[in-house]
Amino acid sequence: MNETLRNTGLFVIIAALIILTGFQQSWNAALLIISMGLISSIMALGVNLQWGFAGLFNVGIMGFVALGGLAAVLVGMPPTEGAWTAGGWGILGALAFGAGTIFAATLVMKRMAKGWLRTVVVLVVLVAGFFIFRAVLDPSVAAVEAINPAGTGYLGGLGLPVILAWPVGGLLAAGAAWMIGKTALGLRSDYLAIATLGIAEIIIAILKNEDWLSRGVKNVIGIPRPVPYEINLQNDPLFVERAAQFGFNPVEASTLWVKVLYVALFASVLLILLWLSQRALNSPWGRMLRAIRDNEVAAEAMGKDVTARHLQVFILGSAICGVAGAMMTTLDSQLTPGSYQPLRFTFLVWVMVIVGGSGNNYGAVLGGFLMWYLWVMVEPMGLWLMNLITYGMSDGYWLKDHLIESAAHMRLMTMGAVLLLVLRFSPRGLIPEK
């Protein structure tokens, strides 16, 4: 079969499954699958850039996605009234002082000769800086968190259009990736994986515990949206009239139209990133990255700066994940730090890349849609299957109860089964790298 025809057929199958979901369940469910499939594909593109192009084993995806989610809060939410005067400037001053302390200790390490005197001076700078930092930070944080803790208790954001949070999320993730890359990219691949996972957990711990920044586990809700609210559409006579012309009631029409607008926005971002990724893949820079991936020693012997190229692609891939994280938080209209689990934001995205085809951007997009569809649909399918299997068993029978309760585990079993089948019969993925 022609390769283009085969690849097109795979995308058509995914589209048919989603359309079937629309007919059998609801178009709201189908459009939500498309929206999250687009976001998942963007995450997969970011990971594919790191792993498929350069062979970097990053399992800290969750941290970069969470930073994108934080950007939606920092940009889109209005500032909390009185928070900046109560302690906001004190927090900024403390953070600046902390950064200055680290810079001063680094400067001492570079300027002074090795010996016990340098060690003592560095310790004095760090210890004194820490106590001053805490003396300024703690009362400022307490003052901010005391402002209506049930409703706010944090600094809030800038009150700007939330769509600006998407590039800001990429910038936050890129900045974190630069700091991580400068310290961890020299490690061997397995140690790099451990380091990135640990740093991702640190980022999540900060979001969960620093209430002044993100409200912690109390969550930030009501994040503004880049699309109209359903209630506003339902109160618009022109919209109600047009919905009636197509045979929809205002409530159903408003929910569908909002999801269609989200799909259009997310698809635009995906198409731009896919176009840029393809340009990068086919450029001399992309060929150099693949040469480094396949043989670092040979590439370095040809004069290529392996560490610098690794840092570049690590930052770019992490930035894409940050953009996806900001988009997802915008779709949910809330930031819930407790929901950032490695199972969903690391393992699942890696499965998307591997199943779709590592090193192929179209494969990453296909894997994003396919695995997200299965992630959403397998559990209800499993419940239906267990009810069918246990149809003849009496209610209360131990085996029937056990099988029905086990339906929730069908999701994980299916993910593993799909991964094993693809690795067995198409080791390079459904759309392999050329």
Image (cartoon, grey):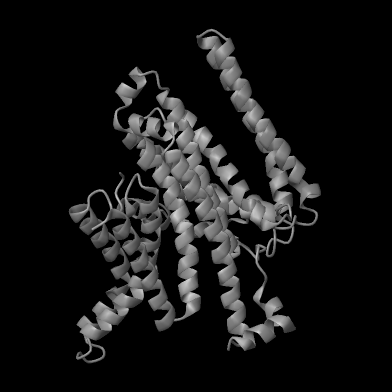
Kindly tell me whether residue 83 is visible in this rendering: yes
Q: Is residue 368 left or right of residue 178?
A: left
Viewer-proximal residue, 222 or 399? 222
Q: To which quarter of the image does residue 281 belong?
A: top left
| Place of residue 201 in the rendered image (x, y in percent of width and height, measured from the top left) | 46, 47
The residue drawn where x is 50% and y is 65% is 35
Q: Who's the residue at 43% across and 26% down the image?
A: 307
Q: Quadrant of the C terminus?
A: top left
Side of 158 relative to 69 (left or right)? right
Report whether residue 211 is seen.
Answer: no
Rendered location of residue 190, percent (x, y): 32, 37
Taking the view exactly as shown, the residue that stands out farthest to the front is 2
**Up/down of 186 relative to 17, above or below:** above
* Foreground residue among 309 and 86: 309
Place of residue 2 in the rendered image (x, y in percent of width and height, measured from the top left): 26, 56
Quarter of the view holding residue 386: bottom left
Q: Quadrant of residue 10?
A: bottom left
Quadrant (top left/top right/bottom left/bottom right) for the N terminus: bottom left
Answer with left or right where residue 114 lies relative to residue 233.
left
Q: Is residue 238 above or below residue 93?
A: below
Residue 160 in the image, given as x and y percentages of width and height: 73, 54
> What residue is drawn where x is 27% and y is 65%?
414
**254 left or right of 295?**
right
Vertical side of 239 occupied by 327: above or below: above
